[in-house]
Image: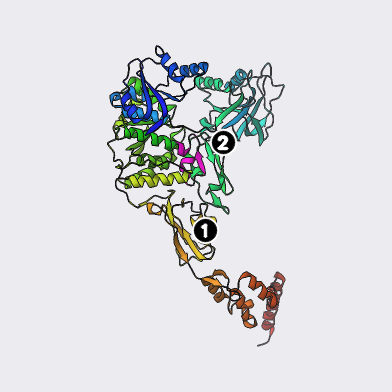
Amino acid sequence: MALPTSTIVLCSCEDTMRPDGKAVGKACSGATVKSASHLCRSEIGLFAELAAKPGDLVIGCTQEAPLFQDLAQESGFKASVSFVNIRETAGWSSEGAKAGPKTAALIAAAATPMPSISPVTLSSEGVALILGRGQIAVDVAAKLSAKLDVTVILSSLDGIMPPRRADFPIRQGRARNAQGWLGAFEVVIDGFAEPAVSSRDGLKAGRGKDGLTSRCDVLIDLTGGQPLFPAPDLRAGYLRADPASPAAVAELLFAAADLVGAFDKPKYIDFKPDLCAHSRSKITGCTRCLDLCPTGAITPSGDHVAISAEICAGCGACAAACPTGAANYALPSPDALLMKLRSLLAIYRGAGGKDAIVLFHDADHGWGLIEALARYGDGLPANVLPVEVQEVTQVGIEAVAAIFAYGGAAVRFLTRARPKHAIDGLRQTITLANQLIGAQGFTRDAAGTIETDDPDLLLAALHAIGRGSVSKAPSSFLPIGGKRDIMMLALREMHRAAPAPVEVIALEKGAPFGRVRVETEGCTLCLSCVSACPVSAIGDNPDKPMLTFDESLCVQCGLCAATCPEHVITLEPRLDFSAFGAKPVLLKQEEPAHCSECGKAFGVKSTIDRIAAKLEGRHWMFSGANADRLKVLRMCENCRVGAMTAQSFDPYGAPERAAAKTSEDYFREREEIEKARAANRDKPD
């Protein structure tokens, strides 16, 4: 694969590694490869010389990137400079001599452009609410009062001495619940009470009130109880510490003091409400994102959901699970991530690399283990290609399918032994991926997690991955389109490149692919399912009573089955590769009912016949002298109005009904019956 015209500089870092410049040059055709051993110091002139030329300059070092960037800015260099870590990921390894293909792949992946994202601004004026118990909360408030506008609410004022000077309010109360984020918290307080100003040997609370709302920018929780939010460590502006731990309290003080001003955070999710399959007509369908969100950032909002960018912590579970593409991860987007994987695996394969294992990791935990392994251990194996992402839980089935379509042998997700938030969504993605790739002839369980905080255990887990089955004819498809389009394209290309492809794969309940089954005998072609389907998988024909189904569009949201008044629709999770690009299949078709007057088609003939049979001779409107009115049932809406007008049809002209009996009528009848019985008893024999 050719790279844009560029120059690649490989530094041996004082000869502590031996980058394979020939392998890199061969794989990255179109690029010039330069070698160095001390680029950041004695050979800094080489960098200045290359950066003065226009074009792309790729430096195989990230440690000294700040130095190079400062030099470039000061000198006004023309080159576009990017950096890639080949030392900890490839060179510092017991298999470094075989890492030429890997080095070339990492450089190619780093050169893949990543789109920028829009930030979300959170503003804090420093109004802080401290919830706690005991003197520790008051002490924390005293230390923060110079930088924040603090208020303390204690669960009890017992044992709290009145301050000599009231620099901040101290109140009694308990937090019932809370909502919001940095700069916009709302806390509902029960038992809120102010202490008497005349408190002498201890603060004495007055009578408490429930349901008071306190608003603040920063919320500090020192109660030691249950957190006020799910995934509390991920809620911006909510600081929580064990009051019995001096170290935790000190860390909280350090973090709280800086929470004044405007803060930008990434807008992780690009959400398109019109694609959401959550609900239709107040009937709930897809709830995948709601079930997975660890922070509570997603809430129902009519026919779709709403995602709070302020609360969202960027785990990406919603985007990975979203079957329609309504929720897209923006850091990076699905197409950008697949472009990076495409470059990575194509260059690796083109340079002679085999049995590629893609290792997804994050910047914090993942890089720490990789660096520790490189500095104190054997380093990553030469066939392990690390890919940094914001969160490993953001990776969806489209990326996993693309890896095997592009020629990968296995994929692993590196997580903490105890993740900050649940990884249920990632486990679901892996389960689905293994079902799909295993059925296609790839190695079963080729996708999985490595859940560890130990670099040695990481290396052992990577070595335990056996040689996997790979595609004999890897794909090089370009990921173009929306998320759903990219996902279906990746699956189709994986199927095409699979060692032993099969057409239909049965899946477990909850999978985002499948078909609907319709019991045609009970279906009346009311078309309720057509209007309920959010992705137009179920269709109709405006010219005739017909129900069609496009399996490639179905996301198994269940809205059609929940909406069907006859309850004749069921879901069948599966992936049918033959449905890609195929025409919609016919589920049911009937003869249309034609107007007896003008011949216009206006309904389903069997339905009209059934209605007429039920009404004929059984309803006053269509029996006896009114039997001729049955003809209007076989007319279209326009002709029916004309016929009813000509006949002076009165829909309220029903025969008079018997008067309803009241309680007085029953009492009167009972009295008459009693009188008759008494009269019979008084008659002589």
**Magenta-drawn segment:** 318-336
| Residue positioned 63% across, 82% down in the render | 624
Residue 186, percent from left and from top = 63, 34
Vertical position of residue 236 compared to residue 433: above or below: above
Q: Which residue is outermost to the top?
A: 42
Q: In the figure, residue 33 lies in which quadrant?
A: top left
**Figure quadrant of the N terminus:** top left
Residue 311 in view of the camera: yes
Q: Position of residue 599 (x, y in %)?
A: 58, 74
The answer to whether residue 619 is visible is no
Residue on which the image places disc 2:
309
The tag earlier along the polypeptide, 1 or 2, is 2
- Using a 10 Å C-alpha cutoff, classify the residue at mark 1 as few (fewer than 14 neighbours), some (14 to 19) or many (20 or more): many
Position above or below: 299 against 506: above
Which residue occupies the foreground of this view, 428 or 682?
A: 428
The residue identified by callout 1 is 529
Verify whether residue 555 appears in magenta.
no
* Crowd class of label 2 (few under 14; some 14 to 19; many from 20; radius 10 Å): many
Residue 444 in the figure: left or right of residue 642: left
Q: Residue furthest left?
A: 467
The C terminus, quarter of image: bottom right
